[in-house]
Image (cartoon, coloured by chain):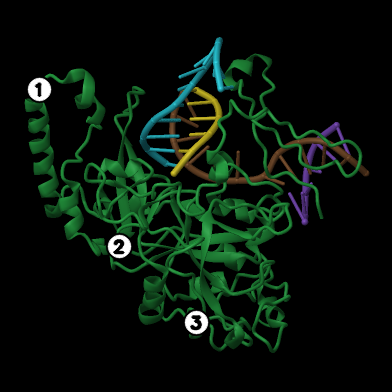
Chain colours: A green, B brown, C purple, D cyan, E yellow
DNA sequence: CCAGACGTTGTT
DNA sequence: GTCTGG
DNA sequence: CCAGACGTTGTT
DNA sequence: GTCTGG
């Protein structure tokens, strides 16, 4: 759940919306473009840099008052905290924290010193103690965090649930409905659905973030995030049994989640992670969204809508055209039969909300069909890790063995053997583990 | 003490 | 990093 | 999350 | 089926 979402706004637009519509202060925000800038995409996938909103605390999180700026009163934390302990019971009343008052926390004890900011972070949480750049498969396992995992002590999330909470800014998210599984174990078709707020406002997923510096001193810190999931609400149950935790803009719940004063996990915080109670809109969208790298505003338009009628017409027209083109079987014909309604997608784009800046630098020039691949020629500034390079054939199955004496210990990173499947015979295939490390 | 796990989803 | 298992 | 690959030999 | 890439 929530393995794909839509977020095609620039940080500057988001900032404006937060301030103007939601009373959410933004004291800092990433540049719209450039190195490490968040990606704007209607098909936002794991590994991309996205926009998160959080209290501006140090890289080590709330409560570690090594505090960044905010000159005076470095102490911050402790004040509001305390109440966070274990007691949920009376959510209102007596809570010494500014429990339910005007939440934009301008009047909690040190709140006036709390600054909030938008920041670009990569989707797929990498714990701060990680030594080496993990690969996608590792990242994929940390794109979500189950709310119930947070309820139990220890584990992967223990390091951040107390001090590194954030909300992930999105316009909506996708969920794939599996059909045809009837029970006979038939072939499953997957139909993508888009889910957004009925009132059209931004969606804020409860999230956790962390900051890591891989070995190699001069490296810049990498910020990453995960999206907290919970059970689906009634509305989405037909689609899936899980959904991201969605917090209301400017709500008390949202401010509690982001409150740096609450620097220890508590029942109160745990209690915020419930299925969404507001109204959602859900509808099927183009299957083109399934392919990572495709990006189009049409992905958030109902596939059966008037805006898409044109597409459908185009689709059949195109199909007819193709057929007419006749028996070019082997060649081109087969090549482009991607199957479903692509037709003149571009027409749809027009009607969608600001198609103006649909993508990154790509420019509007659609390469081929309607849907554009979003990546600029090269992998894209900074996103997909270096990986690209040498194929598995050219690199030795490095095992990173202990370099003779000295401080060996660490990094027993396994590199996936090129022989993979083949080598299965010996069964010992333990795959990559990147969250290893020694260090202190 | 050190070594190793630490996660999610979906599918069966 | 923290926690568990041996 | 979904899509797409899943290989070898020999030569540079 | 499993694994990688985005």
**Number of the front mark, 3 or 2:** 2
Q: Are marks 1 and 3 on the same chain?
A: yes
- Expressed as whole percent of the image width and height from the top left, the position of residue A368 reads 24, 42
Residue assigned mark 1: A326
**In the structure shown, which secondary structural element does the residue marked by tag 1 occupy?**
loop
As rendered, which of A184 and A78 lies closer to the eye?
A78
User: Which comes sooner in the sequence, label 1 or label 3?
Assistant: 3
Q: Are marks 1 and 3 in contact (CB under 8 Å)?
A: no
Which numbered disc, 2 or 1, marks the residue that appears first in the sequence? Answer: 1
**Would you name the residue on which mark 3 appears?**
A103
Q: Residue A355 at what x, y percent from top left? A: 24, 61
For the residues labelled 1 and 3, the Cα–Cα distance comes to: 66 Å
**Which quadrant of the view contains residue A276?**
bottom left
Give the secondary structure at mark 2.
helix
For label 2, the crowd category at 10 Å Cα-Cα, with few meaning under 14, some 14 to 19 and many 20 or more, is some
Judged from the image, the secondary structure of the residue bearing numbered disc 3 is loop
Q: Which mark is residue A166?
A: none
User: Disc 1 or disc 3, which is closer to the eye?
Assistant: 1
Q: Circle 1 marks a residue in which chain?
A: A
Q: Residue at x 85, y 41 (%)?
A: A408
Cβ atoms under marks 3 and 2 closer than 8 Å: no
For disc 3, the chain is A
Which of pointers 3 and 2 lies earlier in the amino acid sequence? Answer: 3
Residue A394, placed above or below residue A230: above
**Mark 3 surroundings: few (<14), some (14-19) or many (≥20) residues within 10 A:** some
Residue position marked by numbered label 2 in the rendering: A357
Of A389 and A437, the residue lying toward us: A389
| Cα–Cα span, label 2 and label 1 | 38 Å
């Amino acid at each position: 759940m929530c393995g794909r979402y839509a977020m095609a706004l620039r940080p500057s637009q988001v900032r404006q919306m937060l301030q103007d519509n939601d009373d959410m202060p933004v004291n800092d925000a990433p540049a719209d473009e450039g190195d490490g800038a968040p990606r704007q995409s209607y098909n936002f996938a794991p590994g991309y840099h996205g926009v998160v909103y959080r209290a501006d605390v140090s890289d080590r999180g709330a409560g570690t008052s090594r505090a960044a700026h905010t000159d005076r009163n470095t102490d911050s934390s402790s004040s509001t905290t305390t109440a966070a302990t274990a007691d949920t019971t009376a959510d209102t009343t007596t809570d010494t924290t500014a429990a339910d008052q005007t939440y934009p926390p301008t009047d909690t004890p040190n709140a006036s010193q709390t600054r909030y900011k938008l920041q670009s972070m990569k989707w797929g949480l990498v714990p701060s103690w990680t030594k080496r750049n993990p690969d996608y498969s590792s990242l994929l396992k940390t794109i979500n965090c189950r709310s119930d995992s947070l309820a139990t002590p220890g584990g992967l999330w223990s390091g951040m649930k107390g001090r590194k909470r954030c909300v992930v800014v999105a316009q909506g998210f996708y969920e794939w409905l599996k059909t045809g599984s009837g029970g006979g174990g038939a072939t499953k078709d997957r139909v993508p659905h888009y889910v957004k707020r009925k009132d059209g406002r931004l969606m804020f997923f409860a999230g956790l973030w962390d900051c890591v510096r891989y070995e190699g001193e001069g490296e810049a810190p990498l910020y990453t995030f995960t999206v907290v999931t919970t059970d689906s609400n009634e509305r989405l149950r037909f689609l899936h049994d899980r959904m991201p935790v969605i917090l209301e803009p400017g709500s008390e719940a949202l401010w509690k989640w982001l409150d740096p004063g609450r620097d220890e996990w508590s029942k109160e915080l745990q209690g915020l992670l419930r299925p969404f109670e507001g109204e959602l809109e859900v509808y099927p969208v183009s299957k083109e969204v399934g392919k990572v790298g495709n990006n189009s505003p049409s992905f958030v338009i109902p596939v059966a809508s008037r805006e898409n009628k044109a597409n459908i017409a185009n689709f059949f027209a195109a199909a007819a055209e193709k057929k007419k083109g006749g028996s070019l079987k082997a060649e081109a014909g087969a090549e482009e039969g991607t199957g479903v309604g692509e037709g003149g997608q571009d027409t749809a784009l027009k009607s969608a909300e600001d198609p103006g800046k649909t993508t990154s630098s790509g420019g509007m020039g659609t390469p081929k069909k309607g849907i554009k691949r979003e990546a600029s020629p090269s992998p894209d500034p900074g996103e997909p890790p270096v990986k690209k390079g040498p194929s598995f054939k050219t690199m030795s199955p490095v095992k990173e063995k202990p370099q003779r004496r000295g401080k060996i210990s660490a990094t027993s990173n396994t590199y996936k053997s090129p022989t993979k499947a083949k080598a299965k015979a010996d069964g010992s295939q333990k795959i990559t583990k990147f969250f290893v490390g020694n260090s202190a």
